[in-house]
Amino acid sequence: MGMGVNLLSANTHNVSQAMTGSGLFTPQGPTTYHYDSETEEGRLLLAELSAHPRLSPTFPPAINWSSYATSIKKFPGEKDAFLGAVRRDIFTFSELRQKSGNYTVCQGDLCCHLMYQMSNKSKEEVYVLGAFDGLHGSVIKYYWQICTLLKCKSTDPNTCGQPVEMAQTRFEMFSLSGTFGTNYVFPEVLYSGVQLAPGEFEVVHDGRLRSKHGTSKPLITATLFGRLYEKDLPHPLRTSP
C-alpha cells in the first residue's frame, strides 16, 4: 500500500460452518478479539501492532516447548485412554477422574502431561486430557501436534471433543506440556462463554502452559497447538511451474 501500511485480514464469520470468532494476536497476547455464535453479523476488528516486536525490551524470550515434557517420567493415565473426535481429528483422551492429579496421554511421537487441581468438580461435568499427532484437514492437509485439557459436552465420554460454550468447573491450578517436535506452538485458554483469559496464564521457558493464580471463571479448554510445517502435505490445487 502506498502509505507504507501493512493490512492483515483474517477469518470469516459464518456460524453454520463453526466460524464464530476472530482476533489479532501478538506474543504478548490478544490485542483485540470477538466471539459470536448467536448472530451472523460481521465485526471489523482494528488494532495497531508493532512492526518489529522482537526489538522491544518486553518481548518474551524464546521457549523450548519440549524441555519440561521430555525431562520427566510419564504420569499415569494411559491404561484407560479412549479415542474421540475433535472436528474430524481422532484424539487419544483420558478422563480426569479426580479433583486433582497428574496425567499423561500419548499419541504418535507426542506425549502430553497435565498437573491440575480443580476448586469445584461438578458431577455433571467431565474433563479429559487429549493428544493428537497427525494431519488435519480434508482437502488441504497440514500437520498438527496438539495437547488439550477440555470439557466434554456431557457426562457421556462419546461427546468429548464436541463444541462446548459453557462450564461450571474452576481450576485452582493447571500445568500443561508436551513433547513437541516443533518450536511453533500456540497456547490458548478459553473460559466459560468462550472468553479468552489474557493475563491469567503464562508459558514458562521450559514449555509449560500454566495458570497464574487459578482460573477466575470456569474453564472450557486449555490447549497447546503445535505446527510441524515440514510434515504438511503439498497443496493439492497448486501445480509446480
Image (cartoon, rainbow, N blue to C red):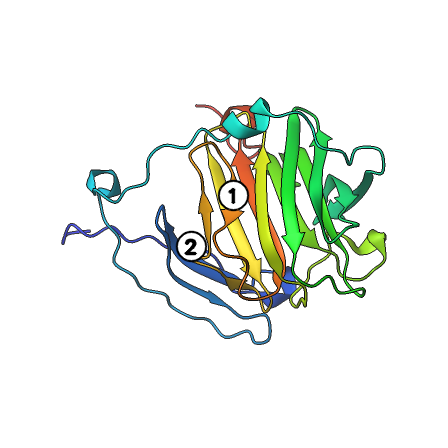
Question: Which amino acid type corresponds to the residue marked 2 in the rendered image?
Answer: Ala
Seen in the image, is 108 located left or right of residue 70? right
Which residue corresponds to the image point at 55% horizontal and 41% vertical from the top-left? 225
Check the image and report above or below for 25 versus 65: below
Q: Which residue is mark 1?
A: 209
Check the image and report above or below for 153 versus 232: below
Check the image and report above or below for 60 versus 64: below
Seen in the image, is 117 located left or right of residue 162? left
**In-front residue for pair 81/137:** 81
Q: Which mark is residue 136?
A: none
SS class of the residue under badge 2?
Answer: loop
| Residue 106 picture location, percent across and down | 71, 31
SS class of the residue under badge 1?
Answer: strand
Quarter of the image for residue 221 reads bottom right
| Image quarter of the C terminus | top left
Q: Are marks 1 and 2 in contact (CB under 8 Å)?
A: no
| Residue 223 picture location, percent across and down | 58, 46
Seen in the image, is 80 located left or right of residue 175? right
Which residue corresponds to the image point at 52% horizontal and 46% vertical from the top-left? 210
Residue 66 visible at all: no
Crowdedness near tag 1: few (<14), some (14–19) or many (≥20) residues, C-alpha within 10 Å = many
Q: Which residue is mark 2?
A: 10
Check the image and report above or below for 188 versus 232: below
Crowdedness near tag 2: few (<14), some (14–19) or many (≥20) residues, C-alpha within 10 Å = few
| Residue 139 picture location, percent across and down | 63, 39
Q: Sequence-wise, which precedes: disc 1 or disc 2?
A: 2
| Residue 50 picture location, percent across and down | 23, 49
Question: Which amino acid type corresponds to the residue marked 1 in the rendered image?
Answer: Leu
